[in-house]
Image (cartoon, helix red, strand yellow):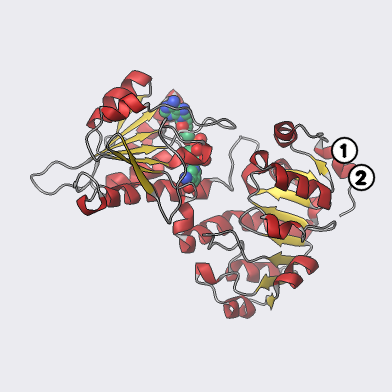
Amino acid sequence: MRVGVAREIKPQEYRVALTPAGARELVQRGHEVLVEASAGVGSAFPDEAYERAGASVVSVDEVWSRAELLLKVKEPIEPEYTRLRPGLTLFTYLHIAADEPLTRALVESGVTAIAYETVETPDGALPLLAPMSEIAGRLAPQAGAHYLEKPKGGRGILLGGVAGVAPGRVLVIGGGMVGYNAAVIAIGMGAQVTILERSVDRMRYLEQIMSGRVTLLMSSSLQIEESLKEADLVIGAVLIPGALAPKLITRDMLRAMKDASVLVDVAIDQGGCAETSRPTTHDDPVYEVEGVIHYCVANMPGAVPITSTRGLTNVTLPYAEELADHGVLGAIRRDPALARGVNVVEGKITYEAVADAHGLGYTPLDDALATAVA
Ligand SMILES: NC(=O)c1ccc[n+]([C@@H]2O[C@H](COP(=O)([O-])OP(=O)(O)OC[C@H]3O[C@@H](n4cnc5c(N)ncnc54)[C@H](O)[C@@H]3O)[C@@H](O)[C@H]2O)c1
């Protein structure tokens, strides 16, 4: 198969969908790999590294027009819509339930689109989202510690403390992938860490793997209110799948927090878990409300593309290989996890939540595949 790798043009996006190591794997399996010039530069992969791996470095027009399978990181943005065409399969993060213009562009163009974020294994895990949650979780204490420094507007406390001086207190709300990773790093920094979770099973698991190193408490409105008063750094890491994040932190609760404490609301991409959270960017990451510094960057992993690109491609490559080896339709038929990722097939929306979100027609995947030609 002819596999293309497009350069990301969305502002602040430095990741790339395939590393030179991944390119070599595909080439060794007999596929042709076309990489757009400079696609890897933001992640410290020069064009020559892809050429050494056996890929061809090509222009933007060539990669979009010649690829049969196009690997990307972010959804196509408007200037890319005209490049979508029948016979092309896109494999990328899409998030189209929240993006009607893109949904229409995908449907009208006749492409087949497989979304990283809806690839789902039979046990309900989302393997292509997990590494970004790991990274955002691990970044959260680092970002929080930075804004706790006095010259950054923070309280002026060192999370690790020092001999004879108490460490800072970190409150993590939500003990899933983000929350666990945030806790691991905060512990490593020497902070005193509390995790609030509402799933007892998850708490039992965290208890097993983190026993003695964190305080685990059942999440409730009262517990959140009490714990917030003690915290120097709060990390919002809740998720209710398919829904907006619950507003667990009210403005009144913020008023009772320590002055110049920090809230890193990682759940901001689902609306945030504080009433006062609104999305920010890496260019302008923080603002203050009721004396609490809010860090609400919606694409935290974008700050560390060298790590993020490798973390992402480690999990996407096996699926890209499947698609290339068995053909798009063959791979979708073989692998139920990949099938869950299919959002659009040649003009038909095959992911019910996406169709519902925009009031458009839904076609079950099997019906769409029965008439597909790609
Ligand atoms: N800002 C970013 O750059 C970025 C990057 C990656 C992920 N995220 C977001 O971070 C959030 C967390 O993602 P995740 O992968 O850890 O999800 P996850 O499903 O692994 O974990 C979420 C946890 O929240 C818990 N939870 C739900 N309601 C709760 C409540 N009321 N109190 C306490 N805990 C509660 C769940 O039981 C679960 O354990 C999501 O919104 C995700 O989209 C943001």
- Note whether ligand 1 is within 8 Å of mark 1: no
Give the quarter of the image for residue 362.
top right
Q: Establish if 20 lies above or below 155.
A: below
Give the quarter of the image for residue 8.
bottom right
Residue placed most toward the observer, 75 or 29 = 75
Quadrant of the frame with the C terminus: bottom right
Mark sitting on residue 371: 2
Judge left or right: residue 22 versus residue 280: right
Judge left or right: residue 314 versus residue 101: left
Quadrant of the frame with the N terminus: bottom right
Q: Establish if 165 lies above or below 171.
A: below
Give SS at disc 1. helix
At x 71%, y 59%, the residue is 80
The answer to whether residue 128 is visible is yes
At x 58%, y 63%, the residue is 16
Residue placed most toward the observer, 371 or 60 = 60
Residue 155 rendering spot, x and y as whole percentages:
20, 44
Give SS at disc 2. helix
Crowd around label 1: few <14 · some 14–19 · many ≥20 (10 Å): few
Residue 130 rendering spot, x and y as whole percentages:
53, 46
- Give amino acid for label 2: Thr
At x 50%, y 31%, the residue is 245
Q: Residue furthest left?
A: 164
Residue 347 rendering spot, x and y as whole percentages:
84, 46
Residue 271 rendering spot, x and y as whole percentages:
50, 36
Q: Which residue is mark 1?
A: 367
Tell me whether circle 2 and circle 1 mark residues in contact (CB < 8 Å): yes
Q: How far separated are the C-alphas under marks 2 and 1?
A: 7 Å
At x 62%, y 66%, the residue is 22
Q: Establish if 12 lies above or below 363.
A: below
Judge left or right: residue 148 versus residue 238: left
- Give amino acid for label 1: Asp
